[in-house]
Amino acid sequence: MLPITTIFQEVAALLLLTAVIGALAAGLRQPLIVAFIAVGIMSGPSGFNWLHSADQVDLLAKIGITLLLFMVGLKLDLHLIRSMGRVALATGLGQVLFTSIVGYGLSVALGLEPLAALYVAVALTFSSTIIIVKLLSDKGEIDSLHGRIAIGFLIVQDIVVVLVMIGLSALGTGATENSLAQEILLVLLKGVALLAGVGILMRYGLPQLLYRLARAPELMMLFAIAWGVSLAALSEALGFSKEVGGFLAGISLASTTYREAIGSRLVSIRDFLLLFFFLSLGAQLDMGHLGSQVWPAIALSLFVLIGNPLIVIIIMGVMGYRARTGFLAGLTVAQISEFSLILGALGVTLGHIDDSVMGLITLVGLITIGLSTYLILYSHPLYERFGTWLQIFERTTPHREQEEDDTSGEALNPDVILCGLGRYGSRMAEGLRKKGYVVLGVDFDPEVVALWHGQGWPAFYGDAADPNLPGSLPLSRARWVVSTIPATSTNVTLLHALRTHGYTKQLGMAAYTVREAEILKQAGIDVVLIPFADAAERAVELLSDSHVLALKSNRNV
């Protein structure tokens, strides 16, 4: 084996090893988080001791965590919480309170100190939005009733975890000579000033700036990253954590038309940088400490795997949902999240917990993430097996089911998703609407999207060439996806992305030459639209009809 003598070679070797272990994890249908932590353990002091560039890896990890919180803020869709009514808040807060209280008692019973038990209990309450969204998307259930409810209470959890981190960072800062009242007042003043500044920019600066940057996607992405990291740095300078600043940066852009385009393009960058956080986390784990934590980790994991879904089923049953809906939604909280690990790392930094407690949280994460993945993948067969026993949690009349099915608007229930809102696409949309179809428009031109919004039509700012675009579209509701974009490469990219995201219904795409039409037909497009040829044929029909009429008129004369 060649010797590793530079940081670049070290990182290259780590990435290669991660790709290999990640492929094995994917074959076992496991989230890559598990593989990343395993590589960290292998490359750390407890393994082969390959990781020596700790400072460089730590810097990339911090940027990755900042972008993670930035995207949580960016995806903070309060409309989704409102559309889910009380269930998102009741289930989210109810599960957090239940898991925190029972988890704290269980942790104390396992011999943890009160502060360490509090950290463990809070860590057990949060579920992984990233993993759940990915699994539900792969199953085509992201827009189902239980999927929408799950995303709703996961957003509630995300809000709670950010508030917890704000509180912890506030407790961990401030000069010791100040009184508690002065320290709290100073933190509040800094927080108000930060929020006020961000609020002013949200109102008067950021929307106009993004509008100007939207025509240069690469520049808009660069600005988004710079904005998130800069606000995180400012937050750290004010005495808060970087995570708070990243979260606020995301919220500041969440109300703009471009949030989905920004989010979809940042997914790959975020995931790549988070790799270094999990590598660093795994490398810092002491396997000697983990050995003594196996039985406590098993006990806490069973509590998460069974207790968290059970409380969700009970709350949803009381609120009038079917046991099946509660079960499918409840399985999404049967694991702890990357935020739990970040929270534990923050506790270690603040000196509130030691490495052994961090190891316990990580071990619970590995167990619950690994097992809950299979629970979600095979949720329907599991319900068929155990559904009869769960009927005790269901009301005689589950009245909320139909009410929730009727809450989504046109944007979430389109008959046709139309990509490309130029003259051809707009005329097509107009004709489809006249026939009673609900059309959701998608375009890369912010002016066109704004025009559609001004006319009261649902429209979405997005780039059809972005492989992650279908992940933010309501594909499960659409009967057709149609592209009128005059670029074969873009349409082929869109086709592959739709197939990757599980879309199997009808597809229509435009071609502007015979060769392009053949490529699309061979790729499996149901209907190939040829605007110029169709228009020419229609013109011939009109001219022929006019000619016949003219001949008849002349003969009559």
Image: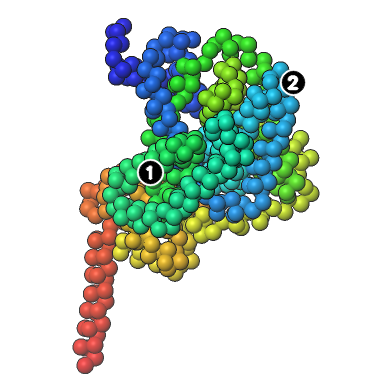
In the displayed structure, 132 sits above or below 521; it is above
Farthest residue to the bottom: give it: 557
Picture mark count: 2
Is 58 above or below relative to 379? above
Q: Is residue 526 above or below residue 368?
A: below
Q: Quadrant of residue 249?
A: top left
For label 1, the crowd category at 10 Å Cα-Cα, with few meaning under 14, some 14 to 19 and many 20 or more, is some
Q: Please tell me the numbered disc located at residue 109.
A: 2
How far apart are the alpha carbons under marks 1 and 2?
A: 45 Å
Q: Residue at x 42, y 40 (%)?
A: 234
Task: Say whether residue 404 is visible.
Answer: yes
Picture residue at 66% right of the left edge, 37% below the top: 96
In this rendered view, identify the residue nearer to me: 57 or 319: 57
**Compared to 120, does 328 lie above or below?**
below
Q: Position of residue 193 (x, y in %)?
A: 49, 48
Report x, y in % for residue 48: 43, 8
Horizontal arrangement in the rendering, residue 483 relative to residue 195 (left or right): left
Q: Visible in this render: residue 501?
A: no
Number of other residues with Cα within 10 Å of mark 2, as a class: few under 14, some 14 to 19, many 20 or more: few
Picture quarter containing residue 361?
top right
Color encoding of the figure: rainbow
Task: Name the secondary structure under disc 1.
Answer: helix
Question: Closer to the N terminus: mark 1 or mark 2?
Answer: 2
Q: What type is the residue that disc 1 sits on?
A: Trp
* 491 displayed left or right of 379: left
**Residue 114, numbered label:** none
Q: Is residue 234 left or right of residue 477?
A: left
Amino acid at dot 2: Ala
Looking at the rendered image, the quarter that the C terminus falls into is bottom left
Quadrant for the N terminus, please. top left
Label ID, residue 227: 1
Which residue is pictured at 64% across the width and 19% down the height? 297
